[in-house]
Amino acid sequence: MSENRLRIGILGAGHLGRIHLQQALEVDTLQVVGFHDPDRERCAVVQAEFGIPALGSVEAVIEAAEAVDVVTPTLSHHACAMQALARGRHVFIEKPLANTLEEGRALVRTAEASGLCVQVGHVERFNPAFQAAVPSLRDPLFIEGHRLAQFNPRGTDVPVILDLMVHDLDLVLGTVRAPVTAVHASGVAVVSDSPDIANARIEFANGCVANLTASRISLKNMRKMRFFQRDAYISVDMLAKETEIVRMEAVAGEPDPFAITLDLGGGRGRRAIQFEKPEVPATNAIREELRSFAAAVRGVHPPRVSVQDGLEALELAHRILERMAENLRHVGPGLHIPAPPSGTL
């Protein structure tokens, strides 16, 4: 099996890079050949912990590997990925795809021209709770998402839209599959130089509306999404790894006396309420996305989160940032800025 394993190098050994290294070692289709981080002390600690060589440069990792896992700060995603692609290496890029739209579009052009495999790390696609909900998601009409995190200086180099909300933007875009027609957004910078809490309302051509809130100044962590569609309500708790589905089904004849039923009135008949709680397997989402990437490189299937998917999430994120900036320009001296939603501060 070892000769068929994909030789992968990891760029970045910070909090998330260390997790990627740890999980890559658990994937039997991957062989971790080395990693690089500019922090020498961190490299020494990680090398001692995992027994994987710390290589001296980005170039050294690229030369040693068939594929490169870019887990560096967002500001360097573009430079690292472009360097790897130029050397003919397949690339896994942590979310968001890039810091700017220009960088993201350049990556898409280069990736498509190269014919190499590029996958973006929108890890919630692989969250087992979301995976358990996917078979039931059919044309949702309203989506509500809350992604709240306790404050951590890590990640504050970018707005909360690119740091946290981009996860939910990817899930919404992958679920709705319709053009965005309107975006409304507001946000407030509280402890950093960019928005720390934000809300976005996204409208789609098929009538669906998504209302998303992201905060990195919460007293508690929360990663929940709720999908409302005709005759069904689906709740996904990506932190607790739980999925709940409530369905309404037409009742023919006399209803079960033990069933919960609703009489819709007006001759529309009765509906029985069915509760489902799908089994959610105990899988690690980062491990599964890296396993999926290895399979995509070997041609088993296309990348589950393509570079184009990453760009679409990035474009929507920047569209939200533009709306937030417009709102701030309209807030003059003495005007009241609404407080964040209850429970986020």
Image: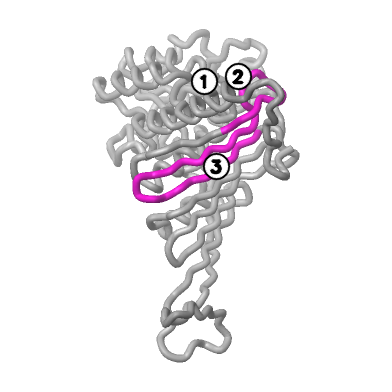
Mark 1 touching mark 3, by CB under 8 A?
A: no
Which quadrant of the figure contains the C terminus? top right
Query: Looking at the rendering, which quadrant does residue 29 occupy?
Result: top left
The residue shown at (46%, 51%) is 131
Q: Secondary structure at mark 2?
A: loop
**Residue 223 shown left or right of residue 176 in the figure:** right
- Residue at image x 48%, y 77%? 264
C-alpha span from label 1 to label 3: 22 Å
Name the spot of residue 342 as percent of width and height, x first: 71, 44
Residue 155 in sight from this viewpoint? no
- Look at the image and say whether residue 240 sits in the magenta stretch: no
Point out residue 83 in the picture as x, y percentages from the top left corner.
38, 12
Q: Are marks 1 and 2 in contact (CB under 8 Å)?
A: yes
Q: Secondary structure at mark 3?
A: strand
**Quarter where residue 46 is shown:** top right
Front-most of residues 238 and 85: 238
First of labels 3, 2 by sequence position: 2
- Residue wearing tag 2: 157
- Amino acid at pointer 3: Leu
The disc at residue 74 is: 1
For the image, the number of numbered tags is 3
Q: Which mark is residue 212?
A: 3
Q: Magenta segment, which residues?
A: 186-215
Q: Residue at x 29, y 41 (%)?
A: 300
Q: Nearer the viewer, residue 47 or 111?
A: 111
**Pointer 1 local density, CA inside 10 Å: few below 14, some 14–19, many at least 20:** many
In percent of width and height, residue 230 lies at 42, 63
